[in-house]
Image (cartoon, grey):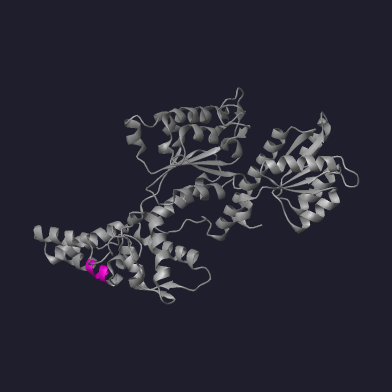
Amino acid sequence: MTENETKTDRSVLVVDDDPAILVMAEDLLTVAGFEVRTAGSAEAALVTLGERDCAVVLSDIQMPGKSGLELLAELRQLRPETPVVMMTAFGSVRSAVAAMRAGALDYVSKPFDAEQLQLALEQAIERRELEDENRRLRRAVERQSAFGELVGKSPAMNEIYALIRKISGNRSHVLITGESGTGKDVVARTIHFSGARKDRPFVPINCTAMPEGLLESELFGHVRGAFTGAHTTKRGLFEAAHGGTLFLDEIGDMPPALQGKLLRVLQDREIRPVGGTTSVEVDVRIIASTNQDLAGEIEAGRFRQDLFYRLNVIPIAIPPLRERAEDVPALAEAFLRRHAGDDRRRFTEQALRKLMRASWPGNARELENCVERALVMADSSEIRAGDILLSPDEGDGQRNGSLHDLLVRTALEQRLTLRELSESYIEAALEATRGRKSAAARLLDVNRRTLYRREERRSSDGTGAAEDRGPA
């Protein structure tokens, strides 16, 4: 199956030697929105699954010929990713236990309750989708460098790489901060998939995307009848992430009332579904992210200080792209490979310099859009500076933006000499690249030797030190 099919697949293969059970199950499940296929024996089921997979298998345990347990064992080899729910006679606990030990995801008793059957299959499909997504993410990470989709060699990124190495083996909570578009979600996935929990679920949720009541139900689950529309019991994302990682994206937007409930979960390591009376233990690592100033939110009374301390065990701050211009070429090349596919496309040096001079208020997300746009605009395998169209707010990074006019007017008003203006700009470029002369030279569009000669001249004039400010 393709990834898109996996995400929407609601196909069920029902296996039973009793034709009446097959008809009853097909009627019930079709009404519930499932795509149902049937097989009258384990042998017929194996033939069917050899030709086409399904989202979940619902099989009886006691059947002539191959039993349901034998079918389950063979499916572990043929379709190890396909969850199996077993049907057993009412009260046959021994058979149910044997099925679960053999690898069945769940079981239902016959004669089965329609809602119980639907819930078991819904949860099996949800589990399948989650595991398929995790496999896809793992493959994506493995295709990249040791740090997944993270790209960059600036000092700031090297510090993040070093921190990820240190925290990969523990379960401490992580708080990632940074502007929108800096790749906080990429850092979160990389932490999970490079760590000890990489084979367990990675479950993301955006705290901005839904109202408080729905967000609470999504996180903690709910029992049947907990509120209007709760027709079945639903497992929450904390339970879905058990043993793995729950990524709370934009935690700063979580409603205050829900923050208190989250705090209790972090303290007690157990959740209580909405409308439920019993608690469920969970083993979940929390990675949270925000583009907000949480200190300011705490002062304004919109974010709980005690929750902040619980989450901020390991803080990771991702600097904006404008503060690490030397990462722009590598990021641009990565986005080029992502969107160009098998086409052999390349940036010219002038194009890369133009990208480095831009300030990227939208960070890596804006850069990716720009690269995708340049691929459309380019008429050849080379992407030139003229093919790169920056957003109106950005200007073109060169001489025709309003920012340039403002800088020129300011320099004239302050009566700066050309040398003073040049020196100030060079110092700013060195500061932005943390003293790396190669990166500063690319930003300034000059030869690196020019910066060394400037340093030697300043040293001989007594206006500066001759030592190297950073690695070339």
The answer to whether residue 194 shows anywhere in this view is: no
The image position of residue 84, as x and y in percent, is: 74, 44
Instruction: Name the residue furthest top.
Output: 277
Q: Nearer the viewer, residue 6 or 196?
A: 6
33 within the magenta span: no
Residue 69 sits in quarter: top right
Q: Is residue 162 above or below residue 376?
A: above
Quarter placement of the C terminus: bottom left
Residue 23 sits in quarter: top right
In screen coordinates, is 43 left or right of 442? right
Instruction: Name the residue furthest bottom.
Output: 380
The image position of residue 238, as x and y in percent, is: 57, 36
Q: Is residue 357 above or below residue 323?
A: below
The image position of residue 212, as x and y in percent, is: 46, 33
Count the marks. 0
Query: Which residue lies at the image location 32% right of the left edge and 67% below the top edge?
Result: 354
The answer to whether residue 305 shows anywhere in this view is: yes
In screen coordinates, is 418 left or right of 193? left
Q: Nearer the viewer, residue 363 or 22?
A: 22
Quarter placement of the N terminus: bottom right
Q: Nearer the viewer, residue 76 or 5?
A: 5
In screen coordinates, is 197 left or right of 35? left
In screen coordinates, is 61 left or right of 383? right
Q: Is residue 386 above or below residue 31?
A: below
Q: Nearer the viewer, residue 210 or 205?
A: 210
Query: Which residue lies at the image location 83% right of the left edge and 35% below the top edge?
Result: 95
The image position of residue 188, as x and y in percent, is: 49, 47
Predominant SS of the magenta segment: helix
Residue bounds of the magenta highlight: 450-454
